[in-house]
Structures are given as structure tokens and as C-alpha cells.
Image: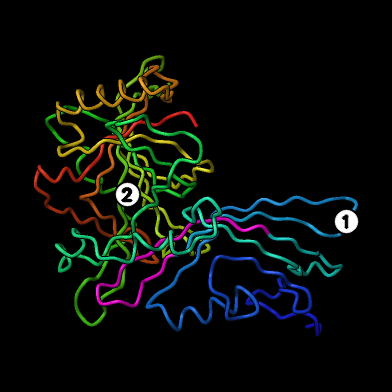
Amino acid sequence: DDDDDVSSSSLFVQYSKASFQWNTPFRKTASSPFEELKKAKEFYNRANVAILSASSSSSSSSTKNEMSLRWEISLLWPSPWEPHVLLTGTSKLTFDVKDDDSITILSQTDHLDNGGKSKTDIYSALSNQLLPRFWDLYHIGMTPAAEKSPLLPPSKASAGFLAPYELYELPPRLYCTTTLPSSKREYREADVIPNHAFVTAIKTMGPNKQTYTPVSPIQVSINRVKEPKDEGGGGSKNEIEWNIPLSPQFTCNPTLPLPSLSKKRGETCTYKYNPSSKLIATVPYNKSVQDEDISSVRKTLYDAVIKDGLKPKISDVDGRPKFFVFQNDVKACFTKDGMGMAVYEWRPDFAKGNVVGIELEM
């Protein structure tokens, strides 16, 4: 290596030792992010970093290039109840490409999605994740504390005065998207994650028990989709869709295994990246996804957002608003091999543990 550079874990990527500039909300005790990650593993019980997307741009008038990264960091905090902390954000890098195709990173600026208006407030991003949550403690003998998907304050829209709903923004994330044809309401098929979504099995006991990360909530929706041509075409049918957020413990792998393809018609499972933020409005809900009472809850939510001047997103198939349910009483559990278990919690009706949501135009 050159005297000016410190080699990273990659043979061809280096941080400039002489001129590297790093602006970050994270505590800096090392000269580069790679070195900082090595030190972090000495403090946290577990740490995983996943790069979800990258885009680059270059200028013909300069040898410097720019790259934007979207990342997620999962930390197992060293406290008695071991909360799973999830941090999401972006980094902007400038770098040089040398004649031997090696890359020298010159500067890096990090921003946290939940870091306040400045995107640099690490305490804001951590504060609501470190304290013990009631349901995690209540079920502490069942699973570790859940890694919760971020619900961010909206960047542009705002809820009306005394609005009966909460307004949130969802950052770009990678999901396991699973579908199943919907049949009768009384079958309650949307209440459980279908078998064809699972990749592996998790050993929870014995000398070879595995560490795993429970994630929550699970997003479930019943959508109207077009029928394939081999089923007659031209018409539409109801389909249940699960969007399960993927833990960085799994997405940090170079390849993501999928479960075996289901031989049953309409049963699919794939990984889907949502590259843009989503604006949603939610209200508490205490029953099943396919319960009859959900219709009145949806109508109340729809009327409230329309009253406040917000515009719901409309389905291309049937022209209806896009509703969904966040199931907080379900934890999808991941190891490095993939999703291997789902744990269902009991919650009393008065707790209204789940929420009904509607997608809105940004």
C-alpha cells in the first residue's frame, strides 16, 4: 500500500490517510469507518452493517467521483434486556479511481434517517430504542427484544389539528414479499405468515442453539391483482401480501437465499427493495386483518385524511386506496441463513396492539 493510504478489508478500496474527511453523527475514535466498526464490535454484543443500495456520479472535468450509499446498522446493545437497535441512513462519498482500478475514498458524510432535522442527532435516533418496551419485557421468556422498523416524522406533510390518526414516513428498506391467493374471510389466512416464506429453521435450545433477530411489525394487505393469462386473463382476484422487513443480520450477506419455489398457483416469495420513502397514516386496531370490523376502521381513516387535504395512493387495478395492517403481535425471526421462525404474541383487545394504515402521496 501507498504511505498515504490505509488499506481496508477490501483489496481495492482504501481510505486516504493524508486527506480523508469524515463528517458523521457517530462517535469517532478511529481514523476511518472500517477501523471504527472493528472497535464497535468490542463494545456491542452483536453488530451488523448492510449496504442496501448505491448510486454513483462522475464529472469529466475532475478525477473525483461521488457515490451515495443507503445502509442499515443493527446493534445488540449491551444492557440487561439486550435491545435490538436499528439505525438507517445514507452516506455520500467522494473518491478517486487510480489507473490500477483501486479506489481511494477522500471524504464521507453520514446522515441518519431519524436524526432530527439536521439528520445528525444520534440521541434522537437511539432514545426510543434503548428503553425497555412493555411487550418485549412481557414476552422476554419467549424471544429476544424485537428490532422495530423505523417510523419517521414526515418530512413535508402534517396531520390536521386533533387528527385521529398518526402520520409517519417509512424509509427505503428491503423486504421479503410473500403472496397467497385470498379465499374466504373466515379462514383467517392473513393472520399467519405462510410456510413458503421460510428459508431455514432456527435452533433455539441445546448446545448448538443459534442467535437470531426478531423483526416487527409485519405489513399485511389484501390487494386486488390482475389474473395471469393462463388463468383466463382480463379479470382480477384478491391476493394477500406480506411485506416482512429484513434484518441487517441477514442482508449483510453477499447473497440472499430464497425458499424453494412453491408448486401451488399464486404462492410467491421474493425480495423487494422499496427505493423511495413512503408516507402513511395509521390508527390503532385490535382485531384480525380479515375481521369484518376493519371496513369501518378503514372508512374512518380515509375520511380523516381526505378532510385534512391528504391524498391517498390509488391501486392501478381497482382504483381503490391502498390500505394495510401493521401486525405488531408477530415477530419474524432471522439468522444469517434467513427467516426461520415466526412468533405470535397474545395481546388483549383493549391494548390495540396492531394498526390499520393507508398509503399517501408524498
The magenta segment is 74-92
Residue at image coords 35%, 34%: 281
| Res. 36 image quadrant | bottom right
Label disc, if present, on residue 285 of the rendered structure = none
Q: Nearer the viewer, mark 1 or mark 2?
A: 1
Where disc 2 sits, the SS reads: helix
Q: Amino acid at mark 2?
A: Ala
Pointers 1 and 2 in contact (CB under 8 A)?
Answer: no
Q: Earlier in the sequence, mark 1 or mark 2?
A: 1
Give the prevailing secondary structure in the magenta stretch.
strand
Q: How far, Cα to Cα, is label 1 from label 2?
A: 47 Å
| Res. 166 image quadrant | top left
Look at mark 2 in the image and give the residue it sits on.
197
Look at mark 1 in the image and give the residue it sits on.
62
Left or right of 331: which side holds 275? right
Q: Amino acid at mark 1?
A: Ser
Residue 319 image point, x, y percent: 40, 17
Left or right of 308: which side holds 299? left
Residue 103 image point, x, y percent: 76, 68
Residue 118 image point, x, y percent: 56, 54
**Which residue is more in the foreground, 93 or 236?**
93
